[in-house]
Image (cartoon, grey):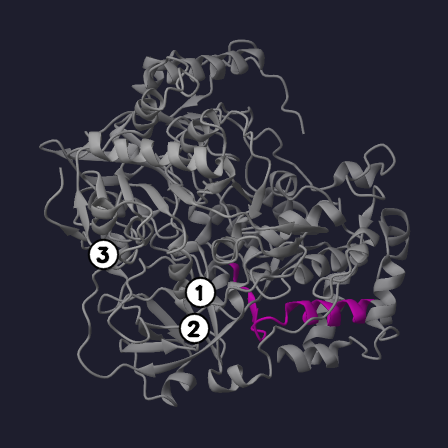
Amino acid sequence: MAMPEPPAGRRPLLTSSHLLTSSHWGVGLAELSEGRLVAVRPHPDDPSPSRINENIPEGLSGSARLRRPAVRRSYLERGPLDPAGERGAEPFVEVSWDRALGLVAEELNRIRATHGNEAIYAGSYGWASAGRFHHAQSQLKRFLNAAGGFLRSEGNYSYNAALVLMPHIVGNFRDHVKQATRWRVIAREGRLVVMFGGIPLRNAQISGGGLGRHRLRGEITACAEAGVEFVNVSPLRGDAAEALNAEWLPPRPGSDTAVMMGLAHTLLSEGLHDADFLARYTVGFDRVAAYLRGETDGVVKDADWAAEQSGLPAERLRGLARHMAAGPTLLCLAVGLQRADHGEQPIWMTVVLAAMLGQIGLPGGGFGIGYGADDSIGTMDRPLRWPSFPQGENPVEDFVPVAMLSEMLLNPGGAYDYNGRRRRFPNIRMVWWAGGNPFHHHQDLNRLRQAFQRPETVIVNEIGWTATARHADIVLPVAAAPERNDFGAGSQDSALVPMPKVVEPPDEARCEFEIFAELERRLGLGTAFSRGLSAEDWQEEMWAEMRRQAAERGFELPDWQSFLQGGVLQFDDPAPDAVYLADFRADPEAHPLATPSGRIELASDTIAGFGYDDCPGQPTWLPPRDWGTAAARDTPLHLLSGQPETRLHSQFDSGAFSRSRKIQGREPILIHPRDAAGRGIADGDVVLVLNRRGRCLAGAVVTEDIRQGCVFLWTGAWYDPDLSDPHHLERHGNPNVLTHDLRTSRLSQGPAAQSAFVEVRRFEGPLPPVKAFDAPLSGGGG
């Protein structure tokens, strides 16, 4: 929705001015001692600040910090075409910047000349640091585009199934999260919120690009205080905040689609569905209804059937369906549910169920995919388009789905399906990663280790010695956000945050712009990357564009230097009363959806035409791959994994707050008391978590807040394998040594990490030390 025009010359609200720093988890106040950053305090204007800021000082100055360029020893001695040594096992030798950039330039020239730019993979998926100019992937991609291009990745690990599926059935998913019904509307108009996967506030510490204030906790609490009821359909009680006083219905993981079908069948069989809404605003309900009745496969998808799949009481499901139909009901789906086998199906069934209730486009009703994945979803949107560092045009048109990294490297030339097309993997000779850590995001890390042995050269730009840096050939140390000037602005937040340099980068770490400007010179690219400008020139230019846009909307912003020395600028939400699809509901002819029919597609002829048995043309019950298999019998506990409270993904895992929640140095794993007792496990024990893909150590947290038969291991512990162990025992607690590297379906090829099964045993014997934060360096160099 358009933002109302403000009075000419209006200034955004200026909050208190201090020595600021900004991250994806919010604004902080930097505290220095003798030139060192010793603390990052909460900003006084943030009602619910994140403690992740406590990780920054140790993350910047601790043993895991990258300080000088480094090259893997055998690569330095023998070059890229002699496959000596093993990435991830060998030590590194620190070298001068001149030597490191000389190696990079030589290798870029060789690969471009011999194999072409399509042999360079710079997918570089990851959150990187906040900041509109010093955005790691934009810097890398602009440089490589200036040098002839690169193979890119498409999609993301967070909600790839939704990115691909939603345009077929409703519309662009990114538009959906920006236009999500505001929680303040739910507080006024809502009566019931049913949360599949909950709304975990540990995730909502984050907003991509940063945020001026954390709002979600306060806004959903206000809903509860206004009398809105909440139901948490999740194996984890903690996926709903205590203040919501939510009813907890813990289903068997992977059964959410069946639960929704049982609810939908009750609506259908009892005449509680809105036939008029379905007729006017949707297509395909006749096929869905026939499937629910069992007319197509002989299986009636009623509440009794859903109870068999989920373990939830059939009568409670019937009662919940009736309650949903009796008044305004918002359906929420956590994006974690689509990171599982057949992850497209719960998304599609959420839309079906909301359509059957007939409340889409009305205040207090409808659906939302991704509430809680980001603090800004349902609370805020940006009032202006923030400037960003331009990446330029990529001459290479090819791409690979982001979660197919290992398969691409291991199977060059192999064929695969994706969103209706048959594609082939390229033959990648160079991987260059900046601002991310695939050894956090990706699944089946033992397989990823094998895949990372295949390229001829791996280059990594990093702040710390992450597992990705350890699996590189050339590592370039880069400055962190508090070590450079920039400004922060979240992709869906309403604040502009000055990010002045707080401290100098340590030792020889450099800003990435400086690195690429020097490589531009060495490669003879003219000024294609830098345009002959300095970093300061670029920032002044980007801020001038920001001021121009703001002035057109009647906002007066300070000049760059005044802004950099000032405080946070807060704008109002441009759509505080947003209701998702309200315009479509009011007039579907004037505001059709961007689907083939212009309507909500409860069944899709397009998807049906792809002929995918793992994603048919309508919502379908497809059990997780391992249900009922020998693997599930041998490893009977369903492994869940998700964002921790203590960090963003794996960022600054070496920091004080992240370490404070570990158990004997290992990541915590939640286990039900009955599952623990049967295995002789007590609270605080170090346990061995294993399956046929890998093994890791973790610290047991025995709690009734998890469904029996499930365990939950937080993501983001820095990958720390013991390569002398025959199973490559991971010592730190990274769940992705256990997750499978199969994907949701051929439609979206999204990651399916939530469909793994494990066994857990009390660990016996001496505990191996965690070495993830030790720099893997040897002497020598030059």
Residue at position x 86%, y 59% from top? 285
| Label 1 Cα crowd, 10 Å radius (few <14 / some 14-19 / many 20+) | many
| Label 3 Cα crowd, 10 Å radius (few <14 / some 14-19 / many 20+) | some
Give the magenta-colored segment's residue range: 244-267
Q: Name the residue under label 2.
A: 693
Question: In the depicted view, which residue is nearer to us: 127 or 391?
Answer: 391
- Residue 336 left/right relative to 88: right
Rendered image quadrant of residue 764: bottom left
First reached walking from the N terminus: tag 1 or tag 3 = 3
Query: Quadrant of the image for the C terminus?
Result: top left
- Residue 414 left/right relative to 703: right
Q: Residue 99: x percent and y percent?
A: 21, 33
Instruction: Let me know if residue 365 appears in the view.
Output: no
Query: Which label lies toward us, 1 or 3?
Result: 3
At label 2, which amino acid type do we have? Arg
Q: Name the residue under label 3.
A: 90
- Residue 576 left/right relative to 638: right
Establish if 55 lies above or below 14. below
Establish if 79 lies above or below 518. below
Mark 3 near mark 2, Cβ–Cβ under 8 Å? no
Mark 2 near mark 1, Cβ–Cβ under 8 Å? yes
Q: Residue 730: x percent and y percent?
A: 31, 68
- Asked if the stretch drawn in magenta spans residue 261, the answer is yes
Q: Mark 1 points at which residue?
A: 444
Disc 2 is placed on an element classified as loop
Instruction: Let me know if residue 782 appears in the view.
Output: yes
Rendered image quadrant of residue 569: top left
Given the current orientation, which residue lies at the most extreme top position? 8
Query: Which label lies toward us, 3 or 2?
Result: 3
At label 1, which amino acid type do we have? Asp
